[in-house]
Image (cartoon, grey):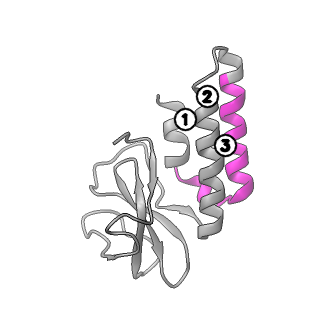
Amino acid sequence: MDEKAIRLEPEYERFLWEVPWPKEVEQPAEDGPFFQIGLWMGAEIVIDGPSGHVLRMPRTAEESGLDGLLVATSLDRFLAMVAQWLTGRRILGTLENQDEDHLLRQHIEDAIWDIDADGSRAEAWTYALHND
């Protein structure tokens, strides 16, 4: 699996399974229950049942460069952010000009922030943009 990819797959066997938050990783502000909707950069993507927040659940406490558990304040915002992020990453792969690269990365970050300022603070959104 490409660790920078997002996997949202309703046919996945564990889609919407309730999963416990690992005790060894930073605990979120949300209390759960948490329901898995996919995978992203080696971690589970879960929805907090009561709040609807979408969180990236690290598998280990040693993950670096990916601070921030909240990746979106709602599922609809998360899906809009994913669409912007994936489209931008695809276009980045076609550019040969460093100035265009830089400007597109800024545009992607701005677009994600416009959709959900709180969720966009998670470094998972920018890590793959700047660490290819």
Q: Is residue 85 magenta?
A: no
Above-or-below relation of 76 to 105: below
In the image: residue 131, left or right of residue 78: left
Residue drawn at 35 percent across, 76 percent down: 17
In the image: residue 72, left or right of residue 65: right
Nearest to N terminus: mark 1 or mark 3: 3
Q: Which residue is mark 2?
A: 92
Mark 1 in CB contact with mark 3 (< 8 angstroms): yes
Residue 44 x %, y %: 37, 60
- What whole-number distance in Å separates the C-alpha atoms at marks 3 and 2? 13 Å
Which SS class for mark 1?
A: helix
Q: Which residue is mark 3?
A: 109
Disc 1 residue type? Leu
Nearest to N terminus: mark 3 or mark 2: 2
Above-or-below relation of 131 to 37: above
Residue drawn at 32 percent across, 72 percent down: 21
Highlighted range, magenta: 101-122
Residue 59 x %, y %: 29, 57
Nearest to N terminus: mark 1 or mark 2: 2
Residue 105: quarter of image: top right
Residue 16: quarter of image: bottom left
Name the residue nearer the viewer: 121 or 94: 94
Residue drawn at 25 percent across, 70 percent down: 23
Q: Is residue 120 magenta?
A: yes
Residue 48 x %, y %: 47, 76
Above-or-below relation of 129 to 27: above
Give the crowd class for mark 2: few <14, some 14-19, many >=20 residues within 10 Å: some
Name the residue nearer the viewer: 11 or 34: 11
Residue sitting at the far top:
97
Q: Which residue is mark 1?
A: 129
Mark 1 in CB contact with mark 2 (< 8 angstroms): yes
